[in-house]
Amino acid sequence: MDLSLFSLSGKTALVTGVSRGLGQAMAVALAQAGADIVGVGLRGMGETRAMVEAQGVRAFEIKADLSHSDTAAAVAAQAIAAAGKVDILVNNAGIIKLADAENHSMEDFDAVMEVNLRSLFLLTRDIARQMIALGGGKIINICSVQSMKGGSGDAAYVASKHAVHGLTRAWANEWGKYNIQVNGIAPGYMVTDNTAKLRQNKEAVAAITAQIPLGRWGEPRDLMGSVVFLASHASDFITGHLLTADGGYMNA
């Protein structure tokens, strides 16, 4: 097999939520495969930028607050102006608000939807317009196993990830004719900031781990291969797909 199928040399990837965790790991993986990186983060991407540039590629930083969806258009314009083009979009930025469903406030519900759905929709729409002009591209949405499992205590997050999964399939149908492949990655239980509060409950951690055939929670590095595959020519005939990276959780 020609391993150059996995090369991203000459490509530019826009990754949201790159300051740490999953976004940082995926940005570094794409850089290792040869892509220049435009990183978007609320706190900036100092550490991530150094890790990306160590791979011998260019790194561009956009500090933006995606909790205000009206910034999404500005981010798209800044990314294209800085790097010249965006071939790959990884929609990773997301938040979670934990609460029992009967006590979930509309304020928290709206906050989750603003970041996880509205900003994602607007950013993707504007980047896709540019991909259409380029003759193709790759869009990778970070979904969640909760979009299939249902979850508990995180209704707004689950609803947002269901919607992102739906957008993944809809965009794959609409933009296939433009040679744009749209896929999702559904991480399982991962060691990230979003699960920090949950991981303080040792009983819950033990119960969840018992349902994971591989016997452990995922680490950010566990998404590195998946994102490079979906961003590369190796996945050119795959679109509308949701790739689970969950240690077998959904299979148990």
Image (tube, grey):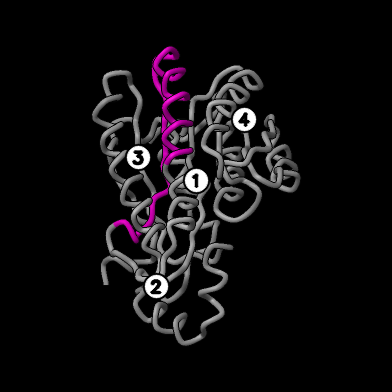
Instruction: Note whether 93 is above or below 244 in the view shown.
Output: above
Side (left or right) of 162 relative to 36:
left
Q: How many neighbours does mark 2 have within 10 angstroms: few (below 14), some (14-19), or many (20 or more)?
A: few
Give me the C-alpha separation between circle 4 and circle 1.
Answer: 25 Å
Front-most of residues 112 and 60: 112
Closest to the observer: 122 or 60?
A: 122
Amino acid type at mark 1: Val
According to the picture, the residue beneath numbered tag 3 turns out to be 183
Q: x, y percentage for residue 236?
A: 33, 30
User: How many residues crowd mark 4 within 10 Å: few (<14), some (14–19), many (20+)?
Assistant: many
Q: Let me know if residue 87 is in the magenta part.
A: no
Residue wearing tag 2? 100
Q: Which residue is mark 4?
A: 36
Q: What residue sits right under mark 1 in the picture?
A: 115
First in sequence: mark 1 vs mark 3: 1
In the rendered image, residue 139, in percent from the top left (x then y), is placed at 41, 34
Q: Are marks 4 and 1 in contact (CB under 8 Å)?
A: no
Say which label, 1 or 2, has the lower sequence index.
Answer: 2
Residue shown at the point (40%, 78%) measured from the top left: 208
Magenta-colored span? 118-147
